[in-house]
Image (cartoon, helix red, strand yellow):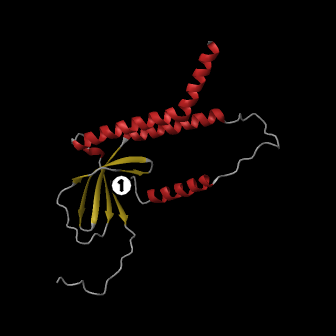
Amino acid sequence: MLKSLAALFLISVLSFNWYGFDLLVNILETHYDQELEKALDENDYDTTQIIELDAKVILPYVADMTDFERIDGEVMINGVYYKFVERKYENGRIIYRCIPNTNKIKLHHARSTFIELMNEIQAAPENHKQTSNSLSVKKTISDYELQHYSKLICSFHELFSAARKITSITNTVAYYSITSPPPELV
C-alpha cells in the first residue's frame, strides 16, 4: 500500500513537471489577460503607467484620426510585456498607447525560475569527475534556430528605448511609383 502511494506520488510529481506547471501558468496567464482586458475596456487602469509607441507608417487614402480608438493586442519590449490600450493615426504616424502587463511578467519569471530549478536538479554534481568515455551531446537544429530567433528579438528590441516615454520606429517598406494615370470610369 505504501509503495503504491509513493509510486502514485512520484508519477504525479513527474506529470506535473512535464505538463502541469505549464498548464497552470497558461491558465493563470489567460485569466490575468482577461482581467486586464476587462479593466482596459472599463477605463479602470493607472494612466501614469501608459507609454506611447510612435511609428512612421505610409497609408495612402487614410484620413487622420481625431481621437484614440480602443484596440487589443500586446508587444514585448526589453523583456516587458505591454498591452495595447488605444491607437491613433495622424500625420503619417501611428501612435500606440500601451500599459505594462505586470502579471504576465511575473508568470514568465516564475516559469523560467521553475525551469532553471528543474535543470539544476537534473544537472550532474560539480564534484563528480567525468570520464573520457562520457556521452557527448550534439546540437540540434532547434538550438541554432533559437540563437537566430534571440538575435532577431534583440535587434527588434534595440528599436525601442526604455528610457524614453515616446519611441519612434521607421517602417522599411519598398515603394514603387506608377507612371501611368489611373483608369477612367465608364
Query: Which residue is found at the position 44% from the left and 51% from the top?
Result: 78
Q: Position of residue 108 (x, y in %)?
A: 46, 40
Q: Position of residue 86 (x, y in %)?
A: 26, 52
Residue picked out by circle 1: 164
Residue 73 location in percent, x, y?
33, 50
Is 38 on the left or on the right of 101, as rendered? left
Above or below, 55 relative to 43:
below
- Which residue is outermost to the front? 186
Residue situated in front as seen by the camera: 130 or 185: 185
Placement of the N terminus among the 4 image quadrants: top right
Q: Could you tell me which residue is drawn at 39 percent across and 47 percent down?
A: 81
Q: Is residue 45 visible?
A: no
Q: Say if residue 14 shows up in the picture.
A: yes
Q: Is residue 180 above or below residue 19?
A: below
Give the residue displayed 30% in from the left and 45% down from the top.
49
Q: Quadrant of the C terminus?
A: bottom left
Q: Nearer the viewer, residue 49 or 15?
A: 15
Q: Secondary structure at mark 1?
A: loop
Task: Report whether 32 appears left or right of 154.
Answer: left
Residue found at the very far top of the displayed protein: 1
Residue 176 in picture, x, y percent from top left: 36, 79
Q: Is residue 111 left or right of residue 75?
A: right
Taking the view exactly as shown, the residue that stands out farthest to the bottom is: 180
Q: Examine the rendered structure and indicate whether residue 10 appears above or below residue 78.
A: above
Whether 110 is drawn above or below 58: the answer is above
- Please rate how many residues cluster around mark 1, counting C-alpha atoms within 10 Å: few if below 14, some from 14 to 19, many from 20: few
With 186 as the anchor, is 27 left or right in this view? right
